[in-house]
Every structure is written in C-alpha cells, then in structure tokens.
Amino acid sequence: ELGFLSGSPGIILDADGKFSNLRIKRLTLDFKGRGSISIAGNLKNLHKPDSLIMDLGLQAKNLSNATLASYVPGLHLPDLSRFGNINIPKLSYNGEPLNFHSVFEAHSSGAGDVNGNVVLYLRNRNFKYNAELKTVQLNLAALVPKPEFESSITAETHLIGSGTNWKTLSNEITLKTDASSTFGNYRVNTLDLSAAMNKGTISTDHVEAEVEGGPEVKVKSAKINLVSDSIPFQFDGSVKDFRLSEVLKNQPNNTARLDLEGTVEGTARNFDNLTGS
C-alpha cells in the first residue's frame, strides 16, 4: 500500500519475493508530465519494522514543490519552492532506518547543488556520524527561510563525530571553499579550516579566511573551553583589517580597523569582558 500518494500518479511496479526478502526490479512514479521518481533494490524484513533493512537506489527527474505537494503529501515534506526544479541523478540508501549509509547527488535550479556521502548511526541516543558534502552555490535559505540564511556556498565539508549535546559531544570538521561564497551580508573569498569540539572545548590548528572588505584571518592554533565557568581561551595567529563596528554594535558608523598578530591567552566570563595578555 502506497498510502503517502495522492493525485493518481502513473505507477509501474515490477517486484518479486516475500516480505522477508523483496526484490524491487522497478518502481516508477510518473507524475503526468510533472516529473518522475524511479526506485530499485531490495527490502528485507518488511513484516518486522524493527529489523527492516533497505538496499535501494533512487533517481528523480524534474520535480518541483508543486509536484511533491500534489502527489506525495503523505511524506510531509517542507516547502521546497525555493529549490525550483529538482533533479536527483543518484541516491543510494543501504542499511536500517537508524543505521545507514547514503550516497547522493542532487541539482536544483533555484538553490544550488549538493553531493554527499553520509553514514549515520542514530540508535540509543548514541548518535554517530560521518558526512562528506560538496556544495555548489547552495542557498541555505531554501531550507531555513530567514533573511540571514541567504547564501551561495561553494565548498567541501567533512564532519565526523558522535553525540549531539555540545557539552559532551566529540567531533572534527574540515571545510574549504572552492570559490567565493556569500552568507548573509558577507562575501567570503577564501575559507580553509580544520577544527574539533570535545566535551565543550573548541580547538583548531588551522584557519585561513578572507572576507571581502575585511577581515583576513590566519590561525596557527586556538582553543576555548565553553564548559568552564571562567571560559579560558588561547589564540595564536593574526587578524588584519577587522572592522570594530562588527563588535561595537552601538557604534555602527565607527570606521576604525584593527590589526592583531601574536598570542592571546586569558579568560572570558562573558564575551563582553575579556581579559588576558
């Protein structure tokens, strides 16, 4: 039963086997000239949802928010209007609902493109993740409809770790832009970083970033402990052409700019009261 469907799309289904091991040779949903979705692969333990295993491949062509809202309302998808026309040449899903590996490639006419290779383990609140993403002119506002998320991001990102509570999680991230990117009012000409977060402590041993109009940042090492009451921090690097008006919000017309190079250590009980040397 395909209870998530509506609007009477054309359906082609060629499958054999049992609920314990069902082979889908072809499942095609034809949305009457408004796009299509094709699926093939294997499903195991359909009669035991807690033990369901999927090995599926999917392709989607010429989809839009109007098509998805009309024909697959049961999926309860968010509003995807900003994505425009969507094509998914490749999406594979292997594993269980809470423990799986997915590789995908998606293109949109309105919000950019994304390629991904993602492994997720979501059982027993012991979340683990390993994700590689490559984006081209991705606009995050298509997913988060707020002005501050208007963006065009062309970058490669790798995130690996475990946990979701920032006080206890452990993860590592690398991010490098492949072309000038924008986020909100900022245009980032270059960004190359390697950072980690471990039980509330954020650290990095490499950051190079240049924002159009300033600043330019190069970090050899930096660390801040957000769990400690005193919030100890350490910074070794340089900041050039930093506009003080960015932090002095009550002085938006302040034209002063700051250059800093060296090592800074200290504590910050709050971000308005820094001490150190």
Image (cartoon, rainbow, N blue to C red):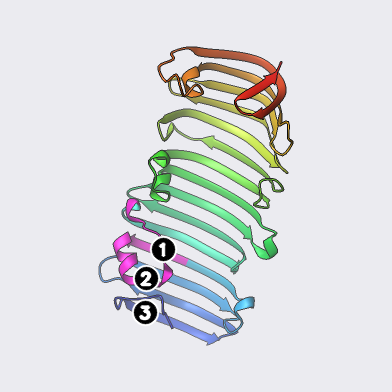
Q: Is residue 277 above or below residue 232?
A: above
Q: Which mark is residue 72?
A: 2
Q: CA distance from mark 2 to mark 1?
A: 9 Å
Q: Residue 77 has which mark?
A: 1
Q: CA distance from mark 3 to mark 1?
A: 23 Å
Q: Secondary structure at mark 3?
A: strand
Tell me: residue 58, above or below residue 155: below
**Which stretch appears magenta?**
58-82
Residue that extends furthest to the left in the rendered view of this protein: 33
Q: Which mark is residue 47?
A: none
Q: Residue at x 39, y 63 (%)?
A: 60
Q: Nearer the viewer, mark 3 or mark 2?
A: 2
Is label 1 in a helix, a strand or a loop? loop
State yes or no: residue 60 in magenta: yes
**Quadrant position of residue 22:** bottom right
Q: Name the residue tied to disc 3.
A: 12
Residue type at tag 2: Val
**Mark 3 crowdedness (10 Å alpha carbons): few <14, some 14-19, many ≥20:** few
* Residue 100 on image: x %, y %: 61, 64
Pointer 2 or 1: first along the chain? 2
Residue displayed at 73% across by 31% down: 230
Disc 3 from disc 2: Cα separation: 16 Å
Residue 172 position within the rendered picture, expressed as x and y whole percent measured from the top left: 66, 42
Displayed quadrant of residue 197: top right
Q: Nearer the viewer, residue 272 or 97?
A: 272
